[in-house]
Amino acid sequence: MNKINIPTPLRQYVGKQASVEVPGATVGEAMNSLVAQHPDLRKHLYTEDGKLRAFVNLYVNDEDIRYLHKEATELKDGDSISIVPSIAGGAGS
Amino acid sequence: MATTTEIPLTLNRDEILRYSRHLIMPEVGMEGQQKLKAARVLCIGTGGLGSPLALYLAAAGVGTLGLVDFDVVDYTNLQRQIIHSTADVGRKKLDSAADKLKGINPFLNLQTFDTRLSSANAMELFRDFDIIADGTDNFPTRYLVNDACVLSGKPNVYGSIFRFEGQASVFATKDGPCYRCLYPEPPPPGLVPSCAEGGVLGILPGLVGVMQATEVIKLILGIGDPLIGRLLLIDALGMKFRELKLRKNPDCPVCGTHPTVTKLIDYNEFCGIRGEEKPVASGVPEIQVEELKRRLDAKDDVFVLDVREPHEYQICNIGGYLIPLNDLPKRVNELDSSREIVVHCKMGGRSAKAAAFLQQSGFTKVQNLAGGITAWSERVDPKVPKY
């Protein structure tokens, strides 16, 4: 099992937890487990055709998966995944 | 990474006394203080992030500070924008900021730009400064600042906040990544809430803004390890700081080896915002607060649905039936589609989404209360507090 760190804007979709433990040998598998457990999260992270949204980045420990093997990046014991969306604060809507 | 301007500016006796605590440290010394005096830093925004940023840079002896802000001080700003005080409500933020900055440091060469930063003026504005500090509050401006920094070769000291979390980094240095290397595309409007709808812990921009000021000073002095290629994640509730590695993306459209963006674009269009910045759910009929009041007074059969959160209902309400927006799909069966339903929230954004959802679910008699309970307070019943 590996830990996925959930950023504040998305915690409401995982029962307010700051991190979730999921099974999975790769990043892709772990993320699938995550959205299977918490289906409300899916549309915030993935487009309709299953691609990770461009304003969301995934890191294994401190490395961006785009520079590893993307969703095929293998996970070892103790590795944690971080979901890091862009934030801008401020302006009202 | 020192600035490229020359350092002939000497310090007078008053300045030497003023900056004594810098001067007695070998890492700064006379040479470092002179570098600070020669530096020209442009702060975009004098709000949450800009307040501590500008205050500390002025105190530290940065010689020239530029401030860009077109906004006016609002009462709700005072919870976190500490450069402004109660007496400043209603004043231009630039005027309020100028008073405090010159009050702290009369040696400051302050330049104010009462304008909205845009593709038409950014390159020209950035030209006379060495470092840009981004304290803005919306995605289009973030991308604009980033691109203009890369195109003009100036580092972008970045900070951003949301509720209890923040990010900080230094973008757009020659060999380092830029903001687009990290986030090639912005989120669609309305997907990431703002401070007005999501709230922000007042101290948070203080924490992050001072980190930005720290990075500016490190760049000027050429000391320490700047946050180049590093994204600092700040979790104020846990008081935890984490760091992620950022890499320059060779395919980055702005700073990569074959850039496709060689001049500034329309950033509102890039961020999917057309015309107004407010995302509006099209096709949902609106009702004005005066009309709702008239109908309620006439005892018409109108069902008022409030889609705010329980803690907001406790602040104030107009007796609506509360189903928070996120719970609506699960609780839609509590509503009677044969009745006329007026949906409201705080300002009209969430209720527009709720009304659109109800329409898609087959409700035909749905209207969105334009301006929300805020408009009700302003135009119908001032006894309802605004928040």
Image: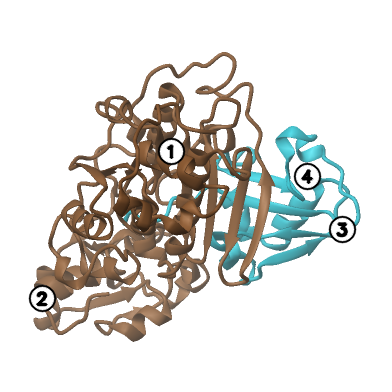
Chain colours: A cyan, B brown
Q: Which chain does the residue under circle 2 lie in?
A: B
Q: Report how far apart the C-alphas of labels 4 and 2 lie in the structure.
A: 53 Å
Q: Which mark is residue A28?
A: 4
Residues under labels 1 and 4: Cα distance?
49 Å
- Residue furthest toward the front? B13
Q: Which of the two residues, B190 or B105, is positioned nearer the viewer here?
A: B105
For the residue marked with disc 3, what is the amino acid?
Gly
Instruction: Say what amino acid the circle numbered 2 marks.
Output: Val
Provide the secondary structure element on which disc 4 rests: helix
The answer as to whether the residues below labels 3 and 1 share one chain is no
The tag on residue A78 is 3
What residue type is disc 1 on?
A: Lys
Spatial distance from mark 1 to mark 2, Cα to Cα? 57 Å
Q: Position of residue B319 (x, y in %)?
A: 27, 85
Residue sitting at 57 percent across and 47 percent down?
Answer: B27
Marking on residue B35: 1
**Compared to B269, does B253 lie above or below?**
above
Q: Earlier in the sequence, mark 1 or mark 2?
A: 1
Query: Could you tell me how far apart the alpha carbons at marks 2 and 3 are, in whole angstroms?
Result: 58 Å
Mark toward the viewer: 1 or 2: 1
